[in-house]
Image: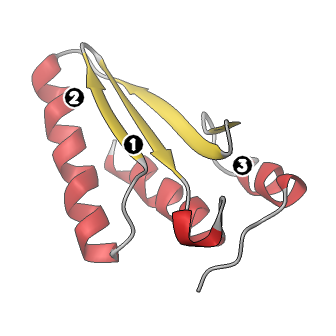
């Protein structure tokens, strides 16, 4: 099982993940796109990556021109290295 990181470890890990922030005990980032279709296409990429990695976002919210992705490992009770690694991978999909 993944181990929950403390706030300092999370904030340190976020230094290498521009745009990702710690909010309410999870990490999240809002990605912007020119069209709704681009938002949906990105969300599908995130979903396919999550299935392959067997680590799914806590939230994947599609809005006009924006997609918010959030991670937390519920089984560990907080943010883990798996969440930071997933965030880095999601950045490559945008």
Image location of residue 64, percent across then percent down: 24, 13
Query: Dot 3: what SS?
Result: helix
Q: Quadrant of residue 69?
A: top left
Could you tell me which residue is drawn at 61 percent across and 39 percent down?
A: 20
Q: Nearer the viewer, residue 1 or 52?
A: 1
Label annotation for residue 39: 2
Residue with the most extreme bottom position: 1
Counting residues from the N terminus, which is met first, the one under dot 1 or under dot 3? 3
Counting residues from the N terminus, which is met first, the one under dot 3 or under dot 2? 3
Image location of residue 26, percent across then percent down: 62, 46
Query: Quick check: 45 left or right of 77?
Result: left
Query: Quick one: quadrant of the C terminus?
Result: top left
Label 1 Cα crowd, 10 Å radius (few <14 / some 14-19 / many 20+): some
In space, the residues marked 2 and 1 are separated at their CA atoms by: 14 Å
Query: Dot 1: what SS?
Result: strand
Image location of residue 34, percent across then percent down: 24, 15
Q: Quadrant of residue 49?
A: bottom left
Could you tell me which residue is drawn at 48 percent across and 43 percent down?
A: 70
Query: Quick one: quadrant of the N terminus?
Result: bottom right
- Residue with the mark numbered 1: 59
In space, the residues marked 3 and 2 are separated at their CA atoms by: 23 Å
- In the displayed structure, 58 sits above or below 76; it is above
**Looking at the image, do the residues carrying marks 1 and 3 touch, with CB atoms under 8 Å apart?**
no
Label annotation for residue 14: 3
- In the displayed structure, 17 sits above or below 36; it is below
Label 2 Cα crowd, 10 Å radius (few <14 / some 14-19 / many 20+): many
**Looking at the image, do the residues carrying marks 3 and 2 touch, with CB atoms under 8 Å apart?**
no
């Amino acid at each position: 099982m993944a181990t929950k990181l403390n706030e300092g470890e999370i904030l340190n890990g976020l230094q290498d993940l521009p745009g990702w922030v710690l909010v309410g005990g999870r990490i999240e980032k809002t990605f912007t796109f020119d069209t709704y279709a681009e938002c949906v296409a990105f969300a599908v990429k995130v979903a396919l990556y999550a299935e392959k990695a067997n680590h799914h976002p806590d939230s994947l919210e599609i809005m006009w021109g924006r997609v918010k992705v959030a991670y937390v490992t519920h089984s560990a009770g907080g943010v883990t290295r798996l969440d930071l690694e997933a965030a880095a991978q999601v950045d490559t999909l945008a």
